[in-house]
Structures are given as C-alpha cells and as structure tokens.
Image (tube, grey):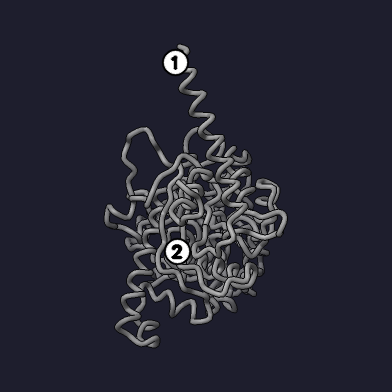
Amino acid sequence: MSSAVLRTNLAQILDKIKLNQKWQMTVSMSTKVPSFGLMFDIDGVIVRGKNVLPSAPETFSALYDRQEEKWRVPAIFVTNAGNSLRQKKADQLTNWLNVPVTEEQVVMSHSPLKMFTEFHDKHVLVAGQGPVEFIAKSLGFRNVTTMDSLRHLFPTLDCVDHKRRRAAPCSFNQFFPRIEAVVLFGEPIRWETSLQLLLDVLISNGHPSTNPPQIPHPHLPVLACNMDLQWMAEAPMPRFGHGAFLLCLEELYKKVTGRDMVYTALIGKPSEITYRHAEHVLQQQAVEVMGMSQPVKTLYCIGDNVCTDIFGANLYHNYLVKRRADTELLSQAEINDHSSRSIDKLIGTSELAGAESCYSVLVETGVFNDSGQPTSLEHSPRDFLPVEKSYQEPSFTTSNVLEAVQTIFKREKWLEN
C-alpha cells in the first residue's frame, strides 16, 4: 500500500474520530426538548444473530444520559421477532447495548394482538417457537391450544416423519372443543407438521377428527405476525423468516382448496397497524417517562430490510399524510369510519398520536444488498402487493446505525454540520 493511500486512510479515520467526539459533546450539552423520536429495528441493525454490531453500543451510549439516568430522545425498538416476551427482548437489548431498556420500549411483531379483544375469549390454535402459549396468554388470549397439544390429541395427522408417527388415536379427541381461530406467531421448528395440521384445521372448520363433506368458505379467522420473507443472522446470506412459511401455507391452501387463504389480520412490519401501535408506545414514553408536554411530531424508523422496514415506514408516512388531510375535511367520528385499513377504528381513540411524518432510514448492515442488484418489493407480503416503486425508496441510506443517528441529529439540528 502506497504512503499516499495510507495518509488518506489515516485522515479519514481521524475525521471520523473528530466527528464522533464532536457528536458526543454536542449531544451531552444539548438542552433542547426533542420533537422527534427513533424507532429501531433489531436484527441487522443492532445485532447479527448473537453478535452485536460494532456501531451499536456507541450509538446508544450517546442516546442515554447516564448522569440524569434518562434517554435524551424518545427511542423504542420495533422488531418482527415474535418468539419471546417483551421483557426478555428488553433484557437482551440492555445486555447488548449497556444501557437500560425497559419492556415498555419494545414492540414485538405480536404486540398489537392485545388490541384484537374480540378473539381473546375464542379457542385459538397458536403456532411458532418459544413459549407461544405463555405469549398468547400475556396478550389476552384465555383459551389456547398449541401445535404440540393438537398433534398429541390427533396423532394420526402428523405422519411425514415416520419415526414420530403415533398410530393409536386418542379416544377423547371427539370431545375436543372446536378451534375458532388460528394465531401464527412465527416460523415453527417442524414446518411439515405445522403446515399439515394448519391445513387440517382450516379445511375441517376447526375440528380435524373427520373428513368434512365440503371445505368451508370462508375459513376460520387467521391472524399472522411477522411477514419477513428473510432476515439477517450470522450467515453471510439472509435466512428464511416467517414470511417464507406463510408463503408455503398460502400456496398449499390454494393448491388443495382452489381458493386463496384470507388473513383476518397481518401484523408486524410493514403493516400500518404495527407502526400505529409503535407510535403509541413511543408517544407514551415521551409523555410518561421523559415528561414531554408536546407529542413527537417526526418519526425516524431505522431498519435494514427494504421490504419490511422501509416499505412499512413509507406506508405509515402515507397514512399520516392522508389522516392529516382527512382531519381537515371530516369530523373525528367520520375519520374513525373511513380511515386507512380501519386502523383508528381498530385501535380506538385511547391510543396516543401526534406524529405528522415518518421517515425511513436504511442501514447497510443487514438484509440490504449493496452489490448493485435492485431490491424488489416482490419479496413483500402477498396482501401488500402491488405497490408503488416509490415505497421501496428510503428517505436516506447510511452505512450503520451510528451514522444513521448522526444524520438524524444533523437534520434535527441537534448536531452541527
């Protein structure tokens, strides 16, 4: 390497160190009340699998005031993960970032299910990994059956793996209470078992003890969380997410029945419902924890996936613009009847609001491919297609989460150019 190149590299490193020192000093001296809030994705932004990305701890060290023991800017974490409780994810973030993260700052893909109260007393079948029964009950569901329980009650249904086959049927399965809805938290361990039993439940209208004379239409309500086709772990290439499992389920259902499977609700990013709920969580933190008297006006959503993080933030920005325009023309009651995808009608007026814009920030540490190949929104969930090409365009792109927050602070005049 030539001496000129070495001098150039050294100068770049020194400039970065000076910028970071200047940023830390500017942030620590700032007494301004923020009018903006930050929503962070986790996988591909803060961590890759179990490995913390090098830019993450430094970022959050500047966002948290250790002397005052409080956050300088309202900040929450919005993840499409759904295989754990919010508190466990908060504990992980605290350990990874070395700053205190509370349960109230975490939005999981399943968090908005708390609002679906009409299903909380129904008998629901839940699928996914981790403590899915405990997660379901923590969200308000009171009558829950897991995939493992269903498999043991109807042992002849699961027969792909010959070593796991149990020929003897349960004599009590005829008394099994009919399943009234299906809740899909995330990708299961054994896809073949879950795909088979889910189809059996949908085709039998909730009681797979006999072969029905005709396939019911419409089928049972299906509520699904986490639509990520892919996500970024330690592997050099993206891995299949729950969106890939849903794609298999949709195609199998259509192949067997000749009809499209219809979701009662699709939540998690890029759904506007999830972003609306996330805004409530962030506004709540601003008011109740930080003592802010005015709502957050501007949201910045930082993520690595064009098909979920960027697409979803842009969808929510469009919702905010439309809602603001509707407010000028309609009464509140009319808005609740005509709002986009009935978000406000579903959530209710008790949810905190106030944001006027939502900017999407893409970081290059995760799913995003910077090889020059175009990213297609065809990877987005079936029910969100087709979409305008503009929805895949981030408000701005940065190399990592540290640079993302520095850029946001410049835009908000919390950091001098």
Does residue 211 appear in the picture of this structure?
no
According to the picture, the residue beneath numbered tag 1 turns out to be 4
Q: Residues within 10 Å of mark 2 (few under 14, many from 20)?
A: some
**Along the line of sight, which residue is nearer the eye, 223 or 176?**
223
The kind of residue on which mark 2 rests is Thr
Residue 84 image point, x, y percent: 64, 56
The residue drawn where x is 66% and y is 62% is 103
Position of 64 with respect to 406 (left or right) is right
Quarter-of-image position of residue 266: bottom left
Does residue 183 appear in the picture of this structure?
yes
Q: Is residue 158 above or below residue 126?
A: above
Q: Nearer the viewer, mark 1 or mark 2?
A: 1
According to the picture, the residue beneath numbered tag 2 turns out to be 298
The residue drawn where x is 51% and y is 49% is 405
The residue drawn where x is 61% and y is 62% is 105
Residue 298 image point, x, y percent: 45, 63
Q: Is residue 76 above or below residue 47?
A: below
**Along the line of sight, which residue is nearer the eye, 13 or 166?**
13
Residue 117, numbered label = none
Residue 141 image point, x, y percent: 61, 73
Q: Is label 2 in a helix, a strand or a loop?
A: strand
Per the model, the C-alpha gap separating discs 1 and 2 is: 44 Å
Q: Are discs 1 and 2 less than 8 Å apart at CB?
A: no
Q: Is label 1 in a helix, a strand or a loop?
A: helix
The kind of residue on which mark 1 rests is Ala
Position of 6 with respect to 218 (left or right) is right
Q: Residues within 10 Å of mark 1 (few under 14, many from 20)?
A: few
